[in-house]
Image (cartoon, rainbow, N blue to C red):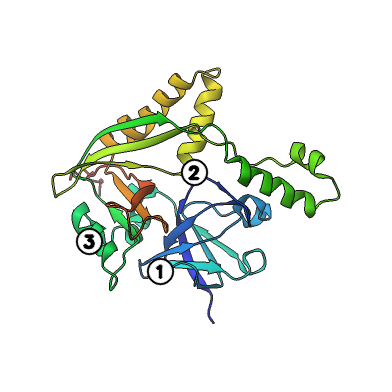
Amino acid sequence: MPLTKILIAVKTYPTLSEKYDELVCTAGFREDGSWIRIYPVPFRKLDYSNRYQKWQWITLDVTRNTKDFRKESFRPTNIEEDIEMGEFVDSKKNWVKRKQYVLQHVYHNMSELIEEAKNPEIGTSLAVFKPKEVLDFVWEPCEREWDKKKLDAVIANQAQHSLFDEETTRGMFKVAKKVPYEFSYIFTSEDDKERKLMIEDWELGMLYWNCLEKADGDEDIACQKVREKYFDEMAKKRDFYFFLGTTKRFHNVAPNPFIIIGTFWPPKEDGTQLTLPL
């Protein structure tokens, strides 16, 4: 089976898994512009040279994920050995190279997208979405620590594959810190309904921790700084899009099964063009 070439566009914030320890959901575009989801990926356990960036081409062997009914879902067969790191797609000239793949199929109506997701003959679970208006960016506190059962399972699993006992491993193994807030966008689409969707983006999580450190631990200031980036700068000043994905658990049961798994925010094009001297 030929290898699949993928332009990485999404890396979600790490979550814990009793089976795989820590996982990152990765999604991106094939060369024809179609979406593909790669899961599970123990990203932070990969060899450093194999830790791909967003907007980097990778090539690897994937197979249909038979445990996931969503049509875009594939799993790597042997990511440590098969993965080939490719070119990084830069953001020069108003992100023109990235737009070539991202903007091939853009949704503008949330009701129509949800209908597609619920239709078993279509079953869309990944999409590029252009909101009509972004109204706000908000946050609310959530659980401050990972689920104890999952964390204990991860630590026990590490100890089982280690020369050290569980007590020693508990101090050595560093899972990603859990972000103690859920961040969400409030927006409208062409159906003129106001909606609120949570965003689970690795870059947002890391921005929060960086801002918290600079704010000497003041969480209110850190959240405000995240808002300045994701609302004031990206949503209001840029040509702004969501990368949307459904969760497997809620795809067929939730009124709106989508969450925001990433953003795309090239500069706005004002229609003017510089005249170069002959």
User: The disc labelled 2 sits on which kind of residue?
Assistant: Trp
The image quarter containing residue 181 is: top left
- The residue that mark 1 highlights is 31
Mark toward the start of the polypeptide (3 vs 2): 3
Is residue 108 something one can see in this rendering? Answer: no
Residue 32: x %, y % from top left: 36, 70
Mark toward the start of the polypeptide (1 vs 2): 1
Residue 251: x %, y % from top left: 35, 58
Compared with 211, 123 (above or below) is: below
Compared with 13, 114 (above or below) is: below
How packed is label 1: few (under 14 Cα within 10 Å), some, or many (20 or more)? Answer: some
The answer to whether the residue labelled 3 contacts the one labelled 1, judged by CB atoms less than 8 Å apart, is: no
The image quarter containing residue 128 is: bottom left
Determine whether the residue tagged by mark 3 lies in a helix, strand or loop. helix
Determine whether the residue tagged by mark 1 lies in a helix, strand or loop. loop
- The residue that mark 2 highlights is 202
Q: Residue at x 66, y 52 (%)?
A: 45
Residue 58: x %, y % from top left: 53, 63
Q: Quadrant of the N terminus?
A: bottom right
Q: CA distance from mark 3 to mark 1?
A: 27 Å
User: The disc labelled 3 sits on which kind of residue?
Assistant: Glu
Residue 115: assigned label: 3
Q: Residue at x 37, y 57 (%)?
A: 97
Mark toward the start of the polypeptide (3 vs 1): 1
Determine whether the residue tagged by mark 2 lies in a helix, strand or loop. helix
Residue 60: x %, y % from top left: 56, 69
Residue at the bottom extreme, as displayed:
1
Left or right: 179 with respect to 113?
right
Q: Residue at x 67, y 68 (%)?
A: 81
Q: CA distance from mark 1 to mark 2?
A: 24 Å
